[in-house]
Amino acid sequence: MEQTYTEDQILIQRIKSGDEASLVEIYKQHRPAFLQWAQHSYRVDEEKAADAFQDAVVCLYRNIVQGKLETLTSSLKTYLFAIGKNVIRKKFQQPVALETDELWMVENLHAEPIDQFATNERQQLVARLMETIGEPCKSILEMFYFRGFSMEAIAERLKYKNENVVKTQKLRCLTSLKNMVRERYQSEDLM
Protein backbone atom coordinates (compact mmCIF):
# COMPACT_ATOMS: atom_id res chain seq x y z
CA MET A 1 0.00 0.00 0.00
CA GLU A 2 1.46 3.32 -1.06
CA GLN A 3 1.56 6.13 1.45
CA THR A 4 0.67 9.74 0.82
CA TYR A 5 3.05 12.62 1.44
CA THR A 6 0.97 13.55 4.50
CA GLU A 7 1.43 10.06 5.96
CA ASP A 8 5.15 10.31 5.25
CA GLN A 9 5.32 13.66 7.06
CA ILE A 10 3.53 12.11 10.04
CA LEU A 11 6.09 9.28 10.13
CA ILE A 12 8.92 11.83 10.08
CA GLN A 13 7.37 13.74 12.98
CA ARG A 14 6.88 10.52 14.96
CA ILE A 15 10.53 9.53 14.43
CA LYS A 16 11.65 13.01 15.41
CA SER A 17 9.75 12.66 18.69
CA GLY A 18 11.45 9.34 19.47
CA ASP A 19 9.01 6.76 18.08
CA GLU A 20 11.37 3.99 16.94
CA ALA A 21 8.44 1.84 15.78
CA SER A 22 7.93 4.29 12.89
CA LEU A 23 11.49 3.70 11.73
CA VAL A 24 10.93 -0.06 11.90
CA GLU A 25 7.74 0.43 9.86
CA ILE A 26 9.65 2.31 7.16
CA TYR A 27 12.35 -0.36 7.17
CA LYS A 28 9.92 -3.25 6.76
CA GLN A 29 7.76 -1.46 4.21
CA HIS A 30 10.52 -0.42 1.80
CA ARG A 31 13.24 -3.08 2.20
CA PRO A 32 11.88 -5.66 -0.30
CA ALA A 33 11.35 -3.09 -3.06
CA PHE A 34 14.76 -1.53 -2.44
CA LEU A 35 16.56 -4.88 -2.60
CA GLN A 36 14.87 -5.74 -5.88
CA TRP A 37 15.52 -2.29 -7.34
CA ALA A 38 19.17 -2.16 -6.25
CA GLN A 39 19.93 -5.65 -7.55
CA HIS A 40 18.34 -4.86 -10.91
CA SER A 41 19.54 -1.28 -11.37
CA TYR A 42 23.04 -1.53 -9.93
CA ARG A 43 23.86 -5.22 -10.44
CA VAL A 44 24.74 -5.75 -6.78
CA ASP A 45 24.05 -8.98 -4.95
CA GLU A 46 21.39 -9.24 -2.24
CA GLU A 47 23.92 -8.88 0.58
CA LYS A 48 25.31 -5.61 -0.81
CA ALA A 49 21.81 -4.30 -1.52
CA ALA A 50 20.75 -5.13 2.06
CA ASP A 51 23.89 -3.45 3.42
CA ALA A 52 23.19 -0.32 1.36
CA PHE A 53 19.57 -0.26 2.53
CA GLN A 54 20.65 -0.53 6.18
CA ASP A 55 23.03 2.42 5.69
CA ALA A 56 20.32 4.39 3.89
CA VAL A 57 17.87 3.90 6.76
CA VAL A 58 20.51 4.98 9.29
CA CYS A 59 21.22 8.07 7.19
CA LEU A 60 17.49 8.81 6.91
CA TYR A 61 17.18 8.54 10.69
CA ARG A 62 20.13 10.90 11.26
CA ASN A 63 18.73 13.41 8.78
CA ILE A 64 15.41 13.39 10.62
CA VAL A 65 16.73 13.68 14.19
CA GLN A 66 19.38 16.27 13.24
CA GLY A 67 16.72 18.43 11.58
CA LYS A 68 18.18 18.10 8.07
CA LEU A 69 14.89 16.65 6.83
CA GLU A 70 11.98 18.83 7.85
CA THR A 71 9.66 18.71 4.85
CA LEU A 72 9.60 16.22 2.01
CA THR A 73 9.54 17.39 -1.60
CA SER A 74 9.01 13.80 -2.78
CA SER A 75 7.71 10.65 -1.15
CA LEU A 76 9.67 9.16 1.72
CA LYS A 77 10.33 6.11 -0.44
CA THR A 78 11.86 8.25 -3.19
CA TYR A 79 14.01 10.07 -0.62
CA LEU A 80 15.15 6.79 0.95
CA PHE A 81 15.94 5.23 -2.43
CA ALA A 82 17.96 8.31 -3.44
CA ILE A 83 20.05 7.94 -0.28
CA GLY A 84 20.46 4.24 -1.06
CA LYS A 85 21.57 5.04 -4.60
CA ASN A 86 24.28 7.33 -3.25
CA VAL A 87 25.35 4.71 -0.71
CA ILE A 88 25.71 2.08 -3.43
CA ARG A 89 27.73 4.40 -5.64
CA LYS A 90 30.04 5.46 -2.82
CA LYS A 91 30.38 2.14 -1.03
CA PHE A 92 30.72 -0.11 -4.03
CA GLN A 93 32.51 2.46 -6.21
CA GLN A 94 30.26 2.39 -9.23
CA PRO A 95 31.42 5.36 -11.29
CA VAL A 96 28.37 5.61 -13.53
CA ALA A 97 25.24 3.70 -12.68
CA LEU A 98 21.76 3.62 -14.08
CA GLU A 99 20.04 6.94 -13.53
CA THR A 100 16.52 5.70 -13.03
CA ASP A 101 14.80 9.05 -13.00
CA GLU A 102 16.62 10.30 -16.10
CA LEU A 103 16.27 7.15 -18.17
CA TRP A 104 12.64 6.51 -17.39
CA MET A 105 11.79 10.22 -17.32
CA VAL A 106 8.80 9.49 -15.20
CA GLU A 107 8.88 12.81 -13.38
CA ASN A 108 8.82 14.71 -16.68
CA LEU A 109 5.65 12.94 -17.74
CA HIS A 110 3.52 14.24 -14.89
CA ALA A 111 2.86 17.65 -13.41
CA GLU A 112 2.93 16.33 -9.85
CA PRO A 113 5.98 14.64 -8.31
CA ILE A 114 5.55 10.86 -8.22
CA ASP A 115 7.38 7.97 -6.71
CA GLN A 116 9.50 6.78 -9.64
CA PHE A 117 10.52 3.60 -7.88
CA ALA A 118 6.94 2.39 -7.49
CA THR A 119 6.22 2.46 -11.20
CA ASN A 120 7.06 -1.10 -12.11
CA GLU A 121 4.78 -1.23 -15.14
CA ARG A 122 6.29 1.99 -16.48
CA GLN A 123 9.78 0.57 -16.01
CA GLN A 124 8.77 -2.55 -17.89
CA LEU A 125 7.29 -0.39 -20.64
CA VAL A 126 10.56 1.53 -21.03
CA ALA A 127 12.49 -1.76 -21.11
CA ARG A 128 10.22 -2.96 -23.95
CA LEU A 129 10.62 0.34 -25.78
CA MET A 130 14.41 0.09 -25.45
CA GLU A 131 14.16 -3.07 -27.54
CA THR A 132 12.33 -1.20 -30.30
CA ILE A 133 14.10 2.17 -30.24
CA GLY A 134 16.63 1.10 -32.86
CA GLU A 135 20.27 1.87 -33.41
CA PRO A 136 22.31 3.84 -32.54
CA CYS A 137 20.01 4.87 -29.67
CA LYS A 138 19.74 1.41 -28.16
CA SER A 139 23.52 0.97 -28.04
CA ILE A 140 24.24 4.46 -26.72
CA LEU A 141 21.62 4.31 -23.95
CA GLU A 142 22.55 0.78 -22.91
CA MET A 143 26.28 1.55 -22.87
CA PHE A 144 25.83 4.76 -20.89
CA TYR A 145 23.10 3.83 -18.41
CA PHE A 146 23.40 0.08 -17.99
CA ARG A 147 27.08 -0.61 -18.55
CA GLY A 148 28.57 2.60 -17.17
CA PHE A 149 30.57 3.62 -20.26
CA SER A 150 31.86 7.19 -20.41
CA MET A 151 30.94 9.41 -23.35
CA GLU A 152 34.53 9.16 -24.55
CA ALA A 153 34.45 5.34 -24.46
CA ILE A 154 31.14 5.27 -26.34
CA ALA A 155 32.54 7.63 -29.00
CA GLU A 156 35.56 5.40 -29.44
CA ARG A 157 33.63 2.14 -29.52
CA LEU A 158 30.89 3.36 -31.86
CA LYS A 159 33.35 5.39 -33.97
CA TYR A 160 31.90 8.84 -33.34
CA LYS A 161 34.05 11.92 -33.96
CA ASN A 162 34.14 12.90 -30.26
CA GLU A 163 32.20 12.73 -27.00
CA ASN A 164 30.20 15.89 -27.79
CA VAL A 165 28.66 14.14 -30.79
CA VAL A 166 27.70 11.25 -28.49
CA LYS A 167 26.17 13.65 -25.95
CA THR A 168 24.06 15.25 -28.67
CA GLN A 169 22.96 11.86 -29.99
CA LYS A 170 22.18 10.65 -26.45
CA LEU A 171 19.95 13.69 -25.90
CA ARG A 172 18.12 12.96 -29.16
CA CYS A 173 17.71 9.33 -28.13
CA LEU A 174 16.33 10.28 -24.70
CA THR A 175 13.89 12.69 -26.33
CA SER A 176 12.79 9.96 -28.72
CA LEU A 177 12.39 7.49 -25.86
CA LYS A 178 10.45 10.07 -23.85
CA ASN A 179 8.08 10.63 -26.77
CA MET A 180 7.61 6.88 -27.23
CA VAL A 181 6.79 6.53 -23.53
CA ARG A 182 4.28 9.40 -23.70
CA GLU A 183 2.58 7.91 -26.75
CA ARG A 184 2.38 4.50 -25.16
CA TYR A 185 1.11 5.93 -21.85
CA GLN A 186 -1.70 7.66 -23.70
CA SER A 187 -2.53 4.67 -25.88
CA GLU A 188 -2.47 2.22 -22.95
CA ASP A 189 -4.08 4.75 -20.60
CA LEU A 190 -1.35 4.29 -18.00
CA MET A 191 -1.40 7.88 -16.81
Image (cartoon, rainbow, N blue to C red):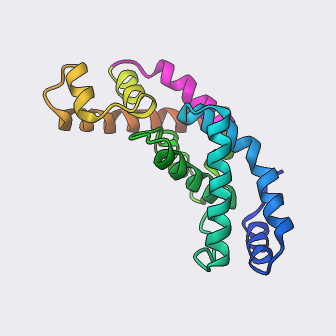
Task: Say how many tags the image has.
Answer: 0
User: Where in the figure is residue 94, as x and y percent of width and height?
Assistant: 44, 39
Q: Main secondary structure of the magenta part?
A: helix
What residue is rendered at 43% in x and 34% in y? 145
Q: Is 31 located above or below residue 47 in the figure? A: below
What residue is rendered at 56% in x and 27% in y? 127
What residue is rendered at 72% in x and 66% in y? 5
**Residue 19 in view here:** yes
Specify whether residue 4 is painted magenta: no
Q: Is 117 located above or below residue 11 in the figure? A: above
Q: Quadrant of residue 113?
A: bottom right
Camera-nearest residue between 98 and 27: 27
Q: Residue furthest right?
A: 21
User: Where in the figure is residue 163, as x and y percent of width and height?
Assistant: 20, 35
In the picture, measured across the screen, residue 150 lies left or right of residue 55, that is left
Camera-nearest residue between 107 and 1: 1
**Residue 189 in view here:** no
Which residues make up the magenta segment? 120-135
In the picture, measured across the screen, residue 33 lies left or right of residue 49, that is right
In the picture, measured across the screen, residue 42 lies left or right of residue 47, that is left
Q: Quadrant of the C terminus?
A: top right
User: Where in the figure is residue 169, as x and y percent of width and height?
Assistant: 27, 33
Q: Is 121 located above or below residue 53 in the figure? A: above
What residue is rendered at 44% in x and 22% in y? 133
Camera-nearest residue between 168 and 16: 16
User: Where in the figure is residue 37, as x and y percent of width and height?
Assistant: 64, 38
Q: Is 104 located above or below residue 132 in the figure? A: below
